[in-house]
Image: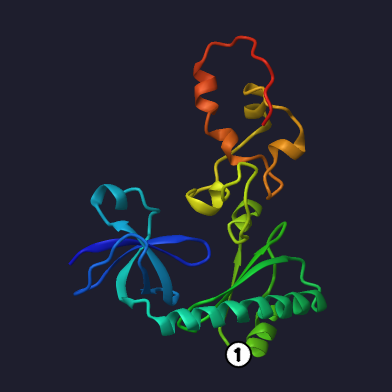
Amino acid sequence: MTKYIVQYGVMRLLGVFSHADLAFRYGDQVIVRTPRGQEVGVVRCEAEPEITAKLDKGFVEDRIVRAMTKTDEADRQKLQQRERGHLERCKRIIQEMEVVMDLVRVEHIFGGERIILYYTAEGRVDFRELVKVLTAELQTRIEMRQVSIREGLRLYPCLGDCGREPCCCSFLRDTPTVTIKMAKLQRVTLDPAKISGHCGRLKCCLRYEHDNYVRQPSEPQPERSS
């Protein structure tokens, strides 16, 4: 039985999934079973030992229910439309209840098991009463998940200054630590508008070349644009 790395969920989670009979290729869309319920996933590659060793600890390992069908695709599109409507409804309720949080995204689990609300906040939020109200409003189990500013960017479709999808929205699994010292070492223009990403934080790409600059002997270099 071949095992596959499958990406699923709006946070682009990775897990190892298998099917007793069917074989899959890169890019195939499938329905998988996760602890959250049945979800839509995309096959990325076969789960070779050297690849699974790089996955986050505690990754999901379960089964592929089936290859995605036209009916599944139609159902997913309906859910996505409902997500947009529910986002506005939830924001209105949060504002009325004066809960201090910024709701970023609403995710419907494909199998209907729950709705996940992603939000940012300065600290811990007591949302117990909010969950009761939202559960009654949406008639579904509600799960709240707090995300960082950088993580929240993964939930927005956008393009970076390079013209490509931001790294945190495509391949980055963990958000790297980036400091203004790294920008100074690389002698980039210290204009906040140029060295900040859509999230308002320093661009993750400043981290990529940092080690090379640290290893190089210190010598004057011309300032370059970010």
Residue that numbered label 1 is attached to = 139
Give x and y (percent) for residue 8.
44, 66
Residue occupying the point 74% across, 29% down: 190
Residue 163 in the image: above or below residue 122: above
Q: Residue 132 lies in what quarter of the image? A: bottom right
Q: Amino acid at mark 1?
A: Gln
Disc 1 packing (10 Å; few <14; some 14–19; many ≥20)? few
Q: Residue at x 68, y 49 (%)?
A: 198
Asked which secondary structure carries label 1, the reply is loop
**Residue 92 locus on image (x, y percent):** 78, 78
Picture quadrant where residue 14 is located: bottom left
The colour scheme applied to this rendered structure is: rainbow
Instruction: Please indicate whether residue 34 sits to the left or right of residue 141 in the image.
Output: left
Quadrant location of the C terminus in the rendered image: top right
Of the pair 59 and 109, the residue shown nearer to us: 109
The quarter of the rendered structure image containing the N terminus is bottom left
- Tell me if residue 185 comes above or below residue 80 in the rendering: above
Q: Residue at x 76, y 79 (%)?
A: 93
